[in-house]
Image: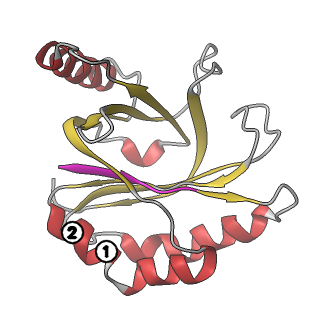
Amino acid sequence: MIAMQYSFTLPADYDMAILDRRIRDKGPMLDNFPGLKFKAYLSARKGDARTGSRENLYSPFYVWDKDEGLSNFICGPGFAGVTESFGRPQVKTWIVWRADISPDIQNARFAIREIFQTGPYAPLAEIRQRESDDATGEVARGEALASVAAFEPTSWTRVRFRLLADLPKDVLRPGVQIYDVGHLSLSDVG
């Protein structure tokens, strides 16, 4: 599996209702897209007390079952429409160590994303096991509706991504990006 995210920083005075409408109208177009495990249409509003965002953002996050689905999307008309509207983004990708999804994923209202640098000589096998166990545990305990642990070995970064029905009280802290979920495109196939 591959996790993928790109992000657009929108002007401070951007009418975010335009983005909400775009997500509502275009979001269902990726429902059941071949090779897609899920796409979370994410946004954050500057000054929103819940997300603590300092910028207006549109930052969808994807988990692909196979690289062919990612390639078909990036080369297809859906992504062409995004680039025509917002420009061509830098697309971050990570190799998924673990992606656990609750049957109740459609109840997600918020997303949390954290990116970590992996230090030189860090014990990768131990980190992988710990991150994978955490992802599985969060969904099993009902703390998250989806939990993804992944890494990228060019810049040696790791990502933790969670979909949630509600935000925990202590979530606002440096290094954490919180988003509102506007739509989830899911696969029919487990």
Q: Which residue has dot 2 on it?
A: 69
Instruction: Measure the C-alpha gap from mark 1 to mark 2.
Output: 6 Å
Q: Position of residue 16 (x, y in %)?
A: 76, 61
Q: Nearer the viewer, residue 104 or 28?
A: 28
State the image quarter where residue 33 is shown: bottom left
**Residue that lies at the very extreme toward the bottom in this rendered image:** 77
Residue ID at (30%, 37%): 102
Q: Position of residue 43 (x, y in %)?
A: 62, 52
Q: Crowding near pointer 2: few (<14 within 10 Å), some, many (20+)?
A: some
Q: Relative to 103, does residue 16 appear above or below in the rendering?
A: below
- Residues tagged 1 and 2 counted as in contact (Cβ below 8 A): yes
Q: Crowding near pointer 1: few (<14 within 10 Å), some, many (20+)?
A: some
Q: Nearer the viewer, residue 142 or 70?
A: 70
Residue range in magenta is 1-7
Q: Relative to 138, does residue 9 appear above or below in the rendering?
A: below
Q: Position of residue 54 (x, y in %)?
A: 76, 39
Residue ID at (58%, 74%): 87
Q: In the displayed structure, does residue 175 sit left or right of residue 135?
A: right
Residue type highlighted by circle 1: Phe
Q: Is residue 6 magenta?
A: yes
Q: Which residue has dot 1 on it?
A: 73
Secondary structure state at the residue bearing disc 1: helix
Q: In the displayed structure, does residue 4 sit left or right of residue 23?
A: left
Residue type highlighted by circle 2: Gly
Q: In the displayed structure, does residue 108 sit left or right of residue 48?
A: left
Residue ID at (41%, 59%): 91
Q: Nearer the viewer, residue 88 or 58?
A: 88
Q: Is residue 21 magenta?
A: no
